[in-house]
Amino acid sequence: MGNSQGVEQLAQSAGNETWAQGVIFKSRLWDVNQKSLYLQNNELIAGYLQAPNSALEEKIFWIRNRAFGQENFPVILSIQGGKSSLACSPGTPPELQLESVNITDLCKDKEASTRFTFFMSNKDGVWRFESAAHPGWFLCTSSKANEPVGLINNPGSSHLVDFYFQPES
């Protein structure tokens, strides 16, 4: 995986051709089974949101993590306007956590930002997000509805690692 052209197109359509440091992009993220992300009891959940519940969908705020250089398109993902960032817990197996850290504060220090960083790749219009802290572990949703978003290193039919990722203005 790793279509840099797809990532550059995403950045351009998000309104910034230079990927300047500190620029926060806003996107819609949903899995290939059409499950949207929403917050429930401080946990990120993937489920089918029908109107009027569609307003509960969390938008993803993301920033390029330049501390990692140009390779692999490192990004930091956040919800709630960039105030609650997705992080990989230390330990084995890693777990996805939400932490009250502003994404613009994270990309100053590579070591401190590693557990918040995901390598974003595109293939055939779908996106994957691999943990920088835990190579081989990917952001995933359950094949069942209304289950927490998590991390998996051996995707199968019970978990989805492919997402649609659409910039919003």
Image: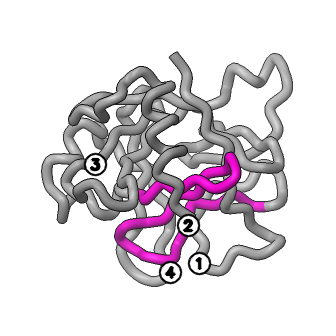
Amino acid identity at mark 2: Phe
Residue under label 4 = 93
Residue type at numbered disc 4:
Pro
- Mark 3 Cα within 10 Å, few/some/many (few <14, many 20+)? many
Who is closer to the viewer here, 132 or 85? Answer: 132
Where does the image place residue 8, in percent across and percent down from the top left? 44, 40
**Residue occupied by mark 1:** 153
Which element is circle 3 on? Answer: loop
Instruction: Determine the residue positioned at 72% across, 38% down.
Output: 36
- Image position of 94 with respect to 163: above or below: below
152 in relation to 8, above or below: below
Lateral position of residue 36 relative to residue 120, left or right: right
Per the model, the C-alpha gap separating discs 4 and 2 is 12 Å
Q: CA distance from mark 3 to mark 1?
A: 23 Å
Name the kind of residue labelled 3 in the image. Asn
Give the overall secondary structure of the magenta segment: strand
Circle 3 residue: 65
Left or right: 138, with 111 as reference point: right
Residue under numbered circle 2: 138
Q: Is residue 148 magenta?
A: no
User: Circle 4 sits in a helix, a strand or a loop, which is it?
Assistant: loop
